[in-house]
Amino acid sequence: MNEKPIGIFDSGVGGLKILAQLRKILPTENFIYVFDRSHAPYGTKSTRFVAKRAKRVSEFLLGKGAKLIVVACNTATGVAIEGLRKEYGDIFVGVEPPIKRAVDGREGKTLVLLTPVTARQQKFVKLFERYNDGSFIVSPQPYLASEIERKFVCLHELEGYVRAILLPFRGQNVTKVVLGCTHYYYIADIIRKVLGENVTVFTAQEGVANRVKEVLTKKDLLATKNKGFVKYIYL
Ligand code: DGL
């Protein structure tokens, strides 16, 4: 039992989808959510920059008493999670493009959307090589996360932009789309509208939240008396 908060961070709003799922399955946990907005986007910066930010934000959250840190960002997970675990212990849960779940034997292409930094990481390259059955199309998107951040209160206005970036993949028999950036979770409906309602979109918030619950349970760190508060902090 441990009543300390869970820390969670992203460059911006992406991680809120993971936070929502965490609150659903862990209603008696308190959270501190960090938007590292003044250093966003992560996905087009250097690996060194992202690693430095992940370390700074993690230290900030540890300073606030976090018992576990959720790296709610594929980019920061790919770049930094192993280093963070080495330095601060096995108290980090990250997020990866849910590629494995998309290998389900169904015919058609699988489009993987992610940030340029994530696409370059060994962690992703290994994952991709392990599961690629020849049906994957990997498409790094340099501006999509920033557009989602910018249009967060009127996401429907992004339809034209999303249509333009998906145009090269129409008519390629894409039946599955893997979202490898937490920001992209917000446009799952637009993606289906553009590519066809029969397209399955894979996101990872449920897997991440389940993993957090599993880790806390195993370490006997679950809170039982907390009210489920969230503190939001902009860095
Ligand atoms: N939401 C983050 C991810 O999952 C990164 C977005 C960005 O800052 O580029 O990769």
Image: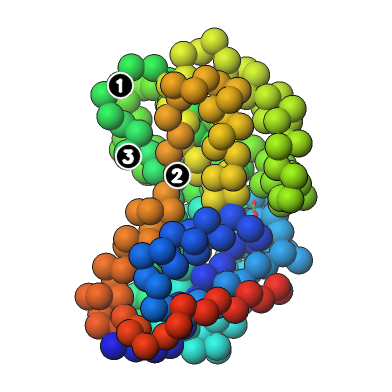
Q: Quadrant of residue 41?
A: bottom right
Residue furthest out toward the front: 227
Check disc 1 and give the amino acid type.
Arg
How far, Cα to Cα, is label 2 from label 1? 18 Å
The C terminus: image quadrant: bottom right
Residue furthest out toward the left: 218
Residue named by callout 1: 106
What secondary structure is marked by label 3?
helix
Residue 228 in picture, x, y percent from top left? 46, 78
Residue 43 in picture, x, y percent from top left? 64, 50
In this view, the residue in front, 197 or 146, is 197
Q: Earlier in the sequence, mark 2 or mark 3?
A: 3
Tell me, for residue 203, which label it has, or none.
Answer: 2
How far, Cα to Cα, is label 3 from label 1? 13 Å
* Crowd rating for badge 3 (residues with CA inside 10 Å; few <14, some 14–19, many 20+): some
* Crowd rating for badge 2 (residues with CA inside 10 Å; few <14, some 14–19, many 20+): many
Tell me, for residue 100, which label it has, or none.
Answer: 3
Check disc 3 and give the amino acid type.
Lys
Image position of 160 (left or right of 170): right
The N terminus: image quadrant: bottom left
Residue 132 in picture, x, y percent from top left? 35, 30
How far, Cα to Cα, is label 2 from label 3? 11 Å
Check disc 2 and give the amino acid type.
Thr
Image position of 141 (left or right of 127): right
